[in-house]
Every structure is written in C-alpha cells, then in structure tokens.
Image (tube, grey):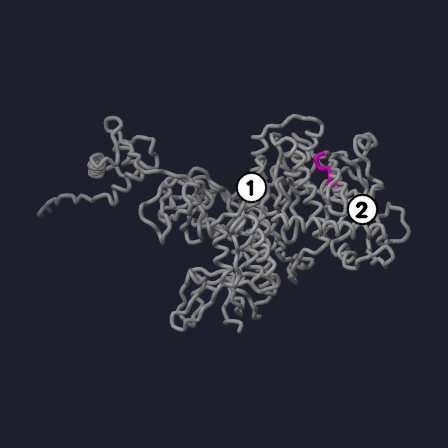
Amino acid sequence: MTRKKKGKSKKTGISNLTNTILSILKKDRNQTYNYKQIAAKIGVNDASSRNQIIKKLHDLLGKKEIEEVERGKFKIVMNTEYHTGILDLSGKGSGYIITDDFEDDVFIASNNINKALDGDEVEFYVYKRRHRGKLEGEITQVLKREKSEYVGTIQIHEKKNFAFVVADSNKMYKDIFVPIDKINNAQNGDKVLVKLEDWPEKADSPYGKVLQVLGKPGEHNTEIHSILAEYGLPYEFPHEVEEFANKIDTSITKEEIAKRRDMRHDLTFTIDPKDAKDFDDALSFKILSNGLYEIGVHIADVSHYVQEGTVLDDEAYERATSIYLVDRVVPMLPEVLSNNACSLRPYEEKLTFSAVFQMNDKCEIKNEWFGRTVTYSDARFSYEEAQAIIESNISAKAEIPSIKTTIPKNVSLTGTEYQTTPEIAQAILKMDALAKKMRAKRMASGAISFDKVEVKFDLDEHANPIGVFFKTSKDANKLIEEFMLLANRKVSEFIGKKDPKRTFVYRIHDEPDDSKLANLQSIVSKFGYKLNFKDRKSTSASLNYLLKEVNGTKEQNLVDTLTIRSMSKAEYSTQNIGHYGLAFAYYSHFTSPIRRYPDVMAHRLLQHYLEGGKSVNEAIYEEKCQHSSNMENLATKAERDSIKYMQIKFMQDHKDENFVGVISGVTDWGIYVEIISNKCEGMVSVRDMKDDHYAFDQDLYAMVGRNSKIMYQLGDEVIVKVKNADLVKKHLDFNLIGKNE
C-alpha cells in the first residue's frame, strides 16, 4: 500500500486583521493588550494566527498607530479626537448623532453603530470624508443606555429552547434573544415587555428577559398598556400607595380653617371640559368699594395632603405628571385625592392655595396676595356652557340661558336644576372682557399664539372610535387660560423678582433655533408665505401673522405642526431664562398640582418663602426639574401614540372609502398624507406609485415622475384610499388614487 505524501498545511490569514486589532484597542483605549489577549478576543489560539497577530502588532507599532507601553503590551495611539452626543436612529438602522461639538448632526452608517441604540449617549469620532455633505462618524462606545425595556411580540422556538422578541419600535434594529427559562410564561405570539440584560461581544442580538406579558396583539387593552410600557409609564398604583392615600384624613377642621384666609363667601365657580373628573382650579370674583375687581385664582392645595417623605409623594414624584390617553387618564395621584379631596367640586368646601389680584379695567394689578385659603364653589360650568353665556352677551336685564347642573343629594336646594344667576353671568362676562385685554397685551409684547386644532374621538362603550371631531379654543377656554397664566407669572415674579438667588421651579422656554426657523421659512415659502426673522419682535409678529393666515386653509395643520417644531422645548429649571413663547420674563407652573408635580414643588416653595424660609438646595431641585421634564416628554409621546392608535383603529372601518388629504411630508421612501376630514396621517410608499418611476427632489419637497414629470409636492391635495391599517405596528398605509384636481 502506497502511503500518501503529507502536503504542507496551508496557512490561512486572519481577514481584516489591522482593523480588528485597532478596533479592540480603540474600544478599551486606556487598557494595554498583549498578543495572547488579542488572540483570545478574536477567538483564535493556533500558532499561525498568533504569529500573524505578533507581526501585525509590530507593523502598527512601526506606523506609530499603537505604542508599546511595557514589553509586549500595546495601547492605541490617541491621534483621534473623540466626542460625545445622543444617537437618533432612523428606521433603516443608520442614524445621526446630536452633539454640542458640531453645528450639524453627524451621520452614522448602520455598520458603524456598534451596538448603540436609539437615544443612547455615545462616544464617537468623525471621519475626514463626508456623507451627502454631512459629517460622518463611527461610534466607539455606548456611555449610557437611554432605555433597557422594550415592548414587542415573542416568537418561541421550543425545540431550540429559546425565543426572540421582535420589538414594536422600528428604531430597535435587532430582535432580542430570550432563553426559554426567562420567557415568564409567555405564549407564542404574545405581546410582552422585555428587559435587556446583556449584549455579549460576539452575539448578534442583545439578551433579555420577559418582565411582563401584556396580552394578545391587536386587543384594545393590550395595545394601550403596550404604549405605556414602551415608555416605562405605569397604569396602576402600587397597593401600598393606594392604601396610604385611602387612610389620609380629608376632613376640613375648624383648626385648619383658622390658619387660612376664609374665602367661602366669595362668588366662586369652575370652568372645565364637560367630561372632566378633576377640577384643579376655580375663579372667584367681586367688585370692591373702590371700583377695583378682586379676582381669585384658587388652586387645589395638594401639598396639604401629599407630604414629603411619604410613599404617596415618592410615587407622585416618579410619575411627575398625569397621562391623558384617548380612552383614559393615568393620574399622578390616586382617585381619592385627584377626583375627590383635591377636586374643587361644586357645593363643597375645599382647601386651596390662592393668588388673589385687585385690578382695574385696564388690567393693571393694584394689589396681589398669595397664600393658603378655604373656598366654596358655587357653580360648575363646562366650557360650552360658559361660552353660551359669553356669546349671548348677557346684560343684567337680559335673559340668562339655562345651565343644567345636577345637585348633590346632600345639598338643600329646591328642584333638581338651577339657572345661572345674573351675578355669575356678569362675573363671567367681566372676566372675559379682562381676559381679552390681557391676551392683547401679551400678543403686543411678542407672545406667539398657538391655537393648534386638537383631534378628539367619540368612543362607544367598548372604547371603539365611532367618530372624529376637532377641539378648538374659544373665548371661554381663553378666559381660563389668561387667568391661569396671570397666576403662574405673578407667583414666579413674586419669588424671582424679589430675590433672584432664591431657588424656585421655573417653566422656561428658550428662543427658537435659527436653523429650524430657516427650515420653516423654506417650507412655508412653498405655500406663498414669507417670514421676517430680523429681530425677536419681528420674528414673533411674523410667526403670529403666519398662524393667522393659515387658519382654515388646507395646510393649516401642517404649518401649525412645523411652526411648533421650530420652537425650543419648554422645560422645568431652577435657572430662569424666561418664556419665549409667552413673552414672559418670569413664569412657573402653579395652577395644576393634581396633574403636575412641578406645581406641587412650586406650592411648597412658595409657602416656605411666605413663612420666611431661607433658599433651599438648588442642585436637588434642578435634578427634580430635569426628571419632571423627562417624564413630561415621555407622557407626551404616549399621548401621541394613543391618538395614532385610535386613528388607525378608526380607519380600519373605512377601507372602502376615498379620502382627500394634504401631502404633509416627502421622503426618499414615499409621501405622507394627512386626511383633511379627520387628521389621520398615513404613508404612500414610492413602491406603490406604479404609474411612473418617482424620485425624491429634496429642493422641491416633492416626488417627481421621471417620464411624466408629474409632481407630488408638500401641501398638494391628493385622493387616497386605505391600503393597510396595522394596529400592532401602529402604521397606516395608503394607496394613491391621484391628485385632487
């Protein structure tokens, strides 16, 4: 038998070895590595591979890309400048880093994301090359995860003993691996809340465990709870918090009344939405002997019941805000307080914190007083009822419209209804006149008038949307708004003007960003509007004129939305910079402590200073301000998602109808269309525009047909039909029928 000659074993080179070594050293650039440690990181242990690594290390040393710190131990040479920022991912896996180090955002390709997720704080460096005119970079490490919990649908592979959770968010570009012993009794196809636990270096997907099973996708409560879970928001109170709240003594004692200004005999009433369950604020009105009007802005004294250091206060702080979803409210405080003890209901005495003003017909404040009070509400009006009084322009001799209100059983009144008295009607009319003057003064000072249309739904008993309507702000709404603004401003001035060094919680709003204003100008010019950004006053006047001009036009909602987006975000801070949108040098939130924690803090601080207390620790309150701003932002996102969900649910029952819509956005991948009649927005994919080959023209904000030259431009009216209404992905797809000629 002839023996086969042994051939020499073929050496195989490690692919991309230079970049691999540099990547390892860059990631831990303060660490030193020898060739054995690098081999272990790469996952090789044969002699040939180790020799290649040793050779490559000496090559890189010769090129001065690495340095030898100790014999055989190497470290990256720091010839690259590193930056930090926040990653904003697109649905395609690439993204941009928002950073203070550069004027423009920095583009990050999907292969340079390096396991960072949307919203993460990251470290990165910038290439010399650019991407479509933008700076381009690479993420080197994740400094801080924005979130670790995601909502998604679980896919269980029982034979393989593992599962994957496919996240709902299109910004989560990886499925999450879950070992079978960490699925928490979830069934295949369930919607779950999953927590990221680890992302091993060589693993393609992050590892996680199921925290909570939310239910079956598409079911109403599952989807609503999923919206809350996605943002880490609660939908029920812990048992110990409910129990604590239920044991609070909510009785009003003579001893407590004696500590307060007694305003129970002043004419007092509330004006709120007709379906409101909690009433934060009430107004009182009387004419003084000197001819001045004394107007009290009375706010529920939540801080009397919610004491610092209790589980109730801890829970209220963590929530920081109530959340107003389409079909429910997730309150900041348990119902025993929010709907009962702290709610300024008619015919009930309540403990309140008040701002009382004496003013003349020119709305000049001649005297002001702040402090704790006890009040009694004589009447409860809806906005519609108050509006009826205003529109009737009632005089003392005129007929008064009948305002029906159910009288509680324990109130001794004749009959089951009452009519508005001339006294209440006159109070509402006079306060409306004063509110109009105050509003005019604000506008003249440079305030911006955002009266954006709100989308509301008529729901049946199963929370299914059976109709869409639009809520607009009328005189009755603006009456309340002006007096709430007055109280918020004057409380802030009382603290900040007297002693700017005293710590307080301000509601601040910075000036708009120049680049965002320029982008707004570029877009609205397509509709024939011009803006003047010469100075602050001309900017405000120009924006107000724009908002007035677009009122009632097809592009109103689009322009309103774009204008709001051009503004900075309002937030809470101990550092007062004023409020640009309201044109106030001092402004705080004082008037809604049932639903906003910063208002509770403002009440506590105001009382502390009224009692002669010294300034409190600024750092502690700044941290609380940041937390409150963050929670407000998450609540806003959840509220928007719930509207989007209801819009899609509504459109599921209207798949056979044609709708007229306005093109509200144009991108590489398609056009977004907002239906005029119900404000539902969906997308027409460029792949479904089959009558021509369409390409995105960035300069024209348009999709243009290559052969026909047909143009679908931002603001154009088009006819669309529902292609797909996906409740689970919360995505609405349209087919384009054509232009609305």
> Label 2 is placed on what type of residue?
Pro
Relative height, residue 154 to residue 720 (above, below): above
Q: Disc 1 marks which residue?
A: 630
Crowd tier of the residue under label 2, counting other residues whose Cα lies within 10 Å: few below 14, some 14–19, many 20 or above: many
> Label 1 is placed on what type of residue?
Asn
Q: Disc 2 marks which residue?
A: 346
Q: Quadrant of residue 375?
A: top right
**Residue nearest the observer in this picture, 478 or 105:** 478
Q: Can residue 311 be seen? A: no
Residue at screen point 64% across, 50% down? 444
Give, as a single range, the part of the protein colored magenta.
298-303
Precedes in sequence: disc 2 or disc 1: 2
**Residue nearest the observer in this picture, 233 or 637:** 637
Residue at screen point 58% across, 70% down? 657
The stretch drawn in magenta includes residue 299: yes
Residue at screen point 41% across, 63% down? 697
Residue 22 x, y percent position in the rendering? 29, 39
Residue at screen point 65% across, 48% down? 442
Q: Mark 2 touching mark 1, by CB under 8 A? A: no
How many angstroms separate mark 2 from mark 1 (CA)?
Answer: 35 Å
